[in-house]
């Protein structure tokens, strides 16, 4: 069992280990007084874990209700958000009550945004059940829904009161869902440095993920503490995401987030190499090739069928755009990435430089 403290407002702990869903009531009592607890989850997770979580919360003394929405990125919209908000109102939640997000990244985003909006803000906790939500989206306070124009374009910052990451949930994930989370972990490895990257370079096992999760969370926590509202350093966490989000949009969100980010990461790595943006040391160590090979070793795509023109159009509504410029994350070497602001008119040439496989 590992605990990582995140020093934001509010401060909170991320606890990582087995059996935490069955203990969630007792553990949340350490940080939250008894109140109404509205569990928000999706139709895939509910049959697996909802009754266990409700029983634990009820045993601890919380008044528990549950809202289940259809699983999938296609539910990450105003309609689902409205239904969750109406549910919270029907359950008479007040500002001293709490929302619990039980599930993956979509659930965390939806429940968190509902908590940020309802009564102008109530508390919420994260109970991630996927590798992606464990290593990345449950930590940091970003919440959002998708718009027709693109991914995560309407949202708010709201830090959770606690994150309980039950690693037992990861043992039964389908291989493609596990790989989806591995993409975010690998992205963190490229940002963080050789020690973390090398642990995933030749694949990642679902049997012992606790240390990887802890290292990813620890790295992200540090970044978020220094730049909670993404004014500078936190933008580095978008490595692979400008092209990744464009791939998701081009696919009408049928390509999972992690798979799209993996392809976006590989495209940016090739672009950096071809445009001379990587360091001499990285060239000597063939780091671009290592990153691309690691993507493939994790069972993830390193390219996309969508052409640069379509990807560029999709990226024009990306939230990292500011006026006629857009900020991209350039992987100069493993452990040393940098922000580069370019004119929007140059984005297509950058994507073209990394689009084709060598």
Image (cartoon, rainbow, N blue to C red):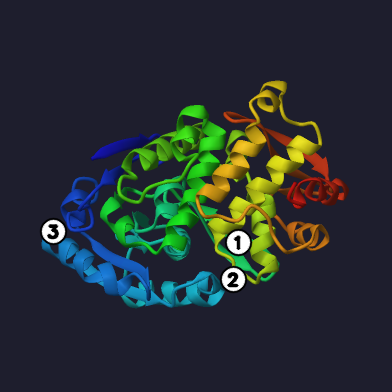
> Is tag 2's residue or tag 1's residue first in the polypeptide sequence?
1
Give the Cα distance between marks 2 and 1: 20 Å
Mark pair 3, 1: CA separation: 35 Å
Tell me: residue 19, above or below residue 71. Answer: above
Q: Residue furthest top?
A: 281
Q: In which quadrant is the N terminus drawn?
A: top left
Mark number, residue 154: 1
Identify the residue under disc 2.
254
Please, which residue is most extreme toward the left here? 59
Indicate the quadrant where residue 44 lies: bottom left
**Mark 2 or mark 1, which is nearer to you?**
2
Crowding at dot 1, Cα within 10 Å, few <14 / some 14-19 / many 20+, comes out as some
Point out the tag, 3 or 2, that comes first from the N-terminus.
3
Location of mark 3 (residue): 60
The quarter of the picture where residue 48 lies is bottom left
Disc 2 and disc 1 in contact, CB within 8 angstroms: no
| Distance from the alpha carbon under mark 3 to that under mark 2 | 39 Å
> If you read the primary sequence from the N terminus, does the residue marked by circle 3 or circle 1 appear first?
3
Q: Position of residue 208 (x, y in %)?
A: 31, 45
């Amino acid at each position: 069992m590992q605990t990582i403290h995140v020093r934001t407002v509010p401060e909170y702990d991320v606890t990582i280990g087995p059996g935490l869903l069955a203990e969630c009531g007792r553990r949340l009592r350490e940080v939250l007084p008894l109140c109404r607890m509205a569990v928000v989850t999706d139709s895939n997770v509910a049959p697996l874990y909802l009754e266990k979580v409700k029983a634990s919360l009820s045993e601890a003394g919380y008044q528990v209700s549950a809202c289940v929405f259809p699983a999938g990125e296609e539910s990450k919209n105003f309609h689902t958000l409205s239904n969750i908000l109406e549910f919270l109102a029907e359950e008479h939640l007040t500002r001293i009550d709490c929302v619990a997000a039980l599930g993956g990244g979509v659930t965390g985003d939806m429940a968190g945004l509902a908590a940020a909006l309802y009564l102008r803000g109530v508390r919420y906790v994260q109970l991630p059940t996927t590798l992606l939500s464990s290593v990345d989206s449950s930590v940091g306070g970003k919440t959002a829904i998708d718009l027709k124009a693109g991914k995560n374009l309407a949202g708010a910052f709201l830090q959770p009161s606690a994150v309980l990451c039950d690693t037992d949930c990861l043992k039964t994930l389908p291989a493609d869902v596990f790989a989806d989370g591995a993409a975010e972990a690998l992205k963190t490895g490229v940002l963080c440095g050789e020690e973390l990257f090398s642990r995933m370079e030749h694949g990642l096992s679902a049997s012992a993920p606790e240390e990887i999760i802890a290292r990813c969370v620890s790295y992200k926590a540090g970044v978020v503490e220094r730049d909670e509202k993404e004014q500078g350093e936190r933008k580095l966490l978008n490595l692979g995401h400008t092209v990744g989000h464009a791939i998701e949009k081009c696919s009408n969100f049928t390509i999972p987030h992690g798979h799209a980010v993996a392809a976006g990461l590989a495209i940016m790595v090739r672009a950096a190499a071809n445009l001379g943006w990587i360091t001499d040391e990285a060239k000597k160590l063939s780091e671009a090739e290592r990153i691309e090979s690691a993507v493939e070793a994790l069972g993830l795509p390193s390219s996309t069928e969508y052409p640069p023109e379509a990807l560029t159009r999709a990226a024009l509504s990306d939230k990292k755009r500011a006026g006629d410029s857009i900020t991209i994350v350039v992987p100069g070497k493993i452990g040393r990435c940098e922000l580069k602001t370019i004119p929007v008119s140059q984005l297509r040439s950058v994507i073209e430089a990394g689009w084709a496989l060598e």
